[in-house]
Image (cartoon, grey):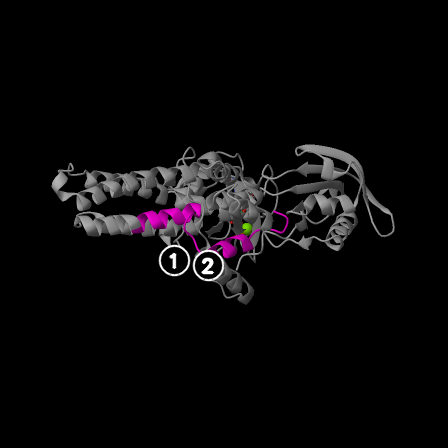
Amino acid sequence: MLPRLSDTIAAVATPPGSGGVGVVRLSGPEALEIAARVWRGHDPRTSPGGRFWHGWVTDPESGDVVDEALLLVFRAPHSYTGQDAVEFQTHGSPAVLRRVLELLLAAGARAAGPGEFTLRAYLNGRMDLAQAESVLAVVEAESETARRQALRGLTRALSQKIEGMSRKLLDLLAHIQALLDYPEEGVEPHEAERVLREVIAEIDRLRATARAGQRVREGARLALVGAPNAGKSSLLNALLGYERALVHHEPGTTRDYLEAPLELEGVPLVAVDTAGVRATDDPVEAAGVARALEAARAADLILYLADRSAPRPEPPELPWKRTLKVATKADLPAAWRDPEAIEVSALTGAGLDALRRAIRERLLGAADEGEVWITHERHLEALNEARAHLEQALGAEDDLMGMSVEAALEALARITGETVDEAVVARIFQNFCVGK
Ligand SMILES: Nc1nc2c(ncn2[C@@H]2O[C@H](COP(=O)(O)OP(=O)(O)OP(=O)(O)O)[C@@H](O)[C@H]2O)c(=O)[nH]1
Ligand SMILES: [Mg+2]
């Protein structure tokens, strides 16, 4: 069940903690009325939309001033939610924000649930469902690439693609219908197969970006493994740009694994430095080696490092499909070469850019930055389903083809939220923060 639109809801929109400014939002039919009760300054009820006023948030019971503030007035439908709405900009103190919210609740507002403002925007037709999901993605974007992709969603780039495909399928459907309804009228045989294949190809282009989309949104784990002294900790530090891990010429320096967050070419990563892998009788070192191999198994991508200036070691068992080979200490004379390995020197920085690019390419595939990426599992599922129906439509009799095309249209429309059930909508908005 979705929450009621007729309540006036309030929430602190800025993150917990202190900041220069804090924002409390209010949206609903009573927004201006409730705001007026706690405001000393220009009466919001007589204010046009799109204006802001200076004044004081005031406790109506005691007359005490809570804070000096700005009040922003939005009038339906020209607001984020499409309803009458008010925003208070106060000083960004947790004590002030809590108090302002308390006063608004006492004055008749209800505490907003997660994502309820954006939910209202969606239900009021201010944005479609894919856009609403992009709002969350923008808020959560941790890297430049993630931000750019989320913004594409916000500006309806994905929605427009979906609508473009849907239009082609609707035309096809109309044609099939005409053939079925007026067989004697000599309706031209349609080019169903061409249209179906065209839309399938468009869907496949989008599906190919899904891995990249998920990676930039959720990040990936990168494990550095190799023999002791291979230069794992040195490479981690070089990628990070600061001395995070202990480096020493003694083999066996890193005993436990350590994790460090890192943004690499627009991809948010957690880099994991591990103990050097070798056979050992030392129980503590053996436990470290076991953890190293565990970290490798859990990683989305493994860097297997081997010292190029020393005899080549026997590699451990690794999932080679998700492993990049790295030859380290490239500033020293080479004892061996491997054309498959990326040569780097943590000391001079040589080869690091090539390594970064290779990591990015392995994690994101060939997805083009200029394209719309699929960033949500939900969208991918809908595309997969639409594709399956279109495959069925290929070569089917007209009436069956029509049914399959209709089913594909229904699946596509779920992405923008034209056909989607309430439970799904409720689940999507549960992931939002309160105040958005
Ligand atoms: N010349 C040169 N020396 C390097 C380079 N990278 C690492 N070293 C040296 O190699 C030694 C081992 O480096 P570490 O980064 O501690 O190696 P590790 O793989 O983390 O070693 P463990 O933690 O013992 O498994 C240190 O003396 C480093 O200074 C490099 O690119 N060039
Ligand atoms: Mg180390």
Judge the density around disc 2: few (<14), some (14-19), many (≥20) Cα neighbours within 10 Å. many
SS class of the residue under badge 1?
loop
Q: Where is residue 248 drawn, in percent x and y? A: 58, 48
Q: Where is residue 110 drawn, in percent x and y? A: 67, 55
Q: Amino acid at mark 1?
A: Glu
Could you say which is closer to the camera, residue 251 or residue 263?
263
Residue at the spot of label 1? 317
Q: Where is residue 270 drawn, in percent x and y? A: 53, 49
Disc on res. 293: 2
Q: Where is residue 244 drawn, in percent x and y? A: 61, 46
Residue at 24%, 48% (x, y): give it: 402
Labels 1 & 2 near each other (Cβ < 8 A)? yes
Judge the density around disc 1: few (<14), some (14-19), many (≥20) Cα neighbours within 10 Å. few
Some atom of ligand 1 lies within 8 Å of the CB belonging to the residue at label 1: no
Residue 135, picture quadrant:
top right
Residue at 61%, 55% (x, y): give it: 113
219 magenta-colored: no
Stretch in magenta: 407-436
